[in-house]
Amino acid sequence: MSEKVEARIKELEERLANTIPNKHTMRSINFIKAQLAKLREDLIQIASSKKGGGRGFGIKKSGDAQVAFIGFPSVGKSSLLNLLTEGSTHSKVAAYDFTTITAIPGMMKIDDAKIQLIDLPGIILGAATGKGKGKEVLAAVRSAELILIIICFREDGSINFDELNKVRNELYKAGIRLNTQSAHIVIKEQSRGGIHFNYKGHQIMNRDEVKALANEFGVINAGIYFSDNDVTPEQLIDFIMGNRVYTKEFIVINKVDLMKDSFSSEKITEMIGHDHWVMISAKNQENINQLRKKIYQELNLIRVYLKPPKQQADMNEPIILHRGDTMKILCQKIHKRFVNDFRYALVWGKSARHPGQKIKKLNHIIEDGDIVSIYTKLDVNK
């Protein structure tokens, strides 16, 4: 069954590559893209139904954030994990492919935060369709808040950017969208009337193209609204399918000890497509601390200090949250009863208009360094 689906995918990919985009071919191109999205999803479902399940490696999330290491075999993931966790993790290291055959979690401690790092088996081509440990690897990646894609210098001193593009492609096929967000689209299905398309700003798709794509996925009668400019067919397909994961990537270029010629930061940024990267040498322990700081920054973590009513604030053990988190999330992290019994909070810090501001709403956004006293319905005497 999977062989037939793979053959059909290959056929459609070839057709797509050989079709020149213009106003006469766009409908055909969009049809092919829709078919590919459905077939790739079918392939993932087939792989997940086989022995092994595709449910990841059963790793329980712990700590304040989770980061997944992914890359081809022998790029140095295991060595790097051991360094970042300062020896608290025992990930087998050897100079040959497929050393890691299961997921190995470790904990990195930095600036009061505990960050769970997961060393995953080296990804191979076809991982999105379940080859190797592909289905387990990609299932584990989908739950991570940050994906570290690790590539390395070759023996000849060049950087293996080819592997970066291949890893990205495997992640894309598995429904993982890197460094982007879901398009702002509203689809309100109706009982009749066909497709009504409204939009804001400039759009690259017209009503007929939107209608054809929607119909391809079984949306026959609906009002469709785009609030972003230039929504692409791929974004509309992703929105309709609804099972995409949007997360960030950070690129680690390992084995800098093999570098022969210097590489400018501008050139590396151009090749990667953004400036979220760092060069390291796990072998020589070069730039490891810099990588720790980069991971912390990429996760957008903040520290919040609790002050029990009429007591001093605990400045030694902050609560770790993400930038943009609300009072509700802080309460949930302490205990769910703090949400149900919340009366108000007193806040000192950047998010407060004045020291000790009384906050009555759970949607109040907390800032780094805030000191918070939470009062509940049980605090009847407060």
Image: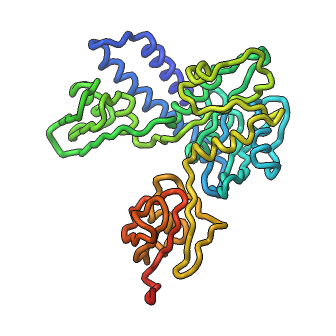
User: In the rendering, at what x and y percent does residue 141 appear?
Assistant: 60, 42
* 243 or 64, nearer to the observer: 64
Q: Can residue 109 be seen in this view?
A: yes
Compared to 357, does 124 lie above or below? above
Identity of the residue drawn at 63% across and 43% down:
295
User: In the rendering, at what x and y percent does residue 92 appear?
Assistant: 83, 41
User: In the rendering, at what x and y percent does residue 44 appear?
Assistant: 53, 36
Compared to 226, does 351 lie above or below? below
Residue 52 lies left or right of residue 83; in this view the side is: left
Judged from this view, the residue extending furthest toward the left is 193
Residue 245 lies left or right of residue 320; in this view the side is: left
Q: Can residue 49 be seen in this view?
A: no
* 181 or 216, nearer to the observer: 181
Identity of the residue drawn at 61% across and 41% down:
50
Residue 232 lies left or right of residue 300; in this view the side is: left
Residue 140 lies left or right of residue 207; in this view the side is: right
**Quadrant of residue 131 within the rendered picture:** top right
Identity of the residue drawn at 52% across and 80% down:
309
User: In the rendering, at what x and y percent does residue 232 appear?
Assistant: 35, 28
* 15 or 151, nearer to the observer: 151
